[in-house]
Image (tube, grey):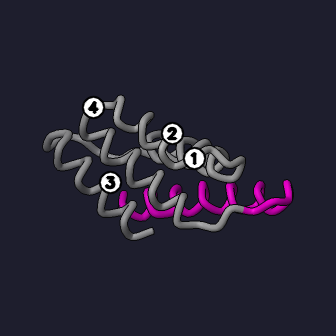
Amino acid sequence: MRVVAMTLAMFLAASGADAQLTTESCQTLSELAQTIMGARQTGVPLTNMISLVEQNEEPFKSIYRTLVMEAYKKPRYHTERMQTSETTDYSNQVLLECLKAMD
């Protein structure tokens, strides 16, 4: 998940000197991660997700691509319980990394 932290740093650099991560922006990023992992766990093909990513402008495109690629490195589970667990874990990991980057 260090990749996510590095991507956040790049985002801040690209956003301008006065851009800052906030708890709210970290929560938004965590919700996005939850959506991405939810799609991964239900079997949405990576090509579909990359197509969605490509519709965005930088620096958001880089952040979304990183979240998608990190999610698709994780295993896909076949029971609802494990899918929910993996989705929650991924969302929490992204939130944790983002909050740590605020310090």
Extent of the magenta region: 77-103
The residue lying at 30 percent from left, 47 percent from top is: 62
Marks 1 and 4 sit apart, C-alpha to C-alpha, by 22 Å
In which quadrant is the C terminus drawn?
bottom left
**Label pair 2/1, CB-CB below 8 angstroms:** yes
Determine which residue is flagged by label 3: 8
| Secondary structure mostly taken by the magenta-highlighted segment of the chain | helix
Q: Position of residue 73 (x, y in %)?
A: 52, 66
Compare residues 36 and 90 and report the one nearer the observer.
Answer: 36
**What kind of residue is marked 2?**
Asn
Determine which residue is flagged by label 4: 57
Marks 3 and 1 sit apart, C-alpha to C-alpha, by 25 Å
Which of the two marks, 4 or 2, is nearer to us in this view?
2
Q: Position of residue 26 (x, y in %)?
A: 47, 47
Which picture quadrant has residue 17?
Answer: top left
Marks 4 and 2 sit apart, C-alpha to C-alpha, by 17 Å
Q: Is residue 20 above or below residue 4?
A: above
Determine which residue is flagged by label 1: 45
**What kind of residue is marked 3?**
Leu
Horizontal relation, residue 63 to residue 33: left or right: left
**Label pair 2/3, CB-CB below 8 angstroms:** no
Marks 2 and 1 sit apart, C-alpha to C-alpha, by 5 Å
**What kind of residue is marked 4?**
Glu
Marks 3 and 4 sit apart, C-alpha to C-alpha, by 15 Å
Checking the image for residue 72, the label placed there is none
**Tag 2, which secondary structure?**
helix
Residue 20 falls inside the magenta stretch: no
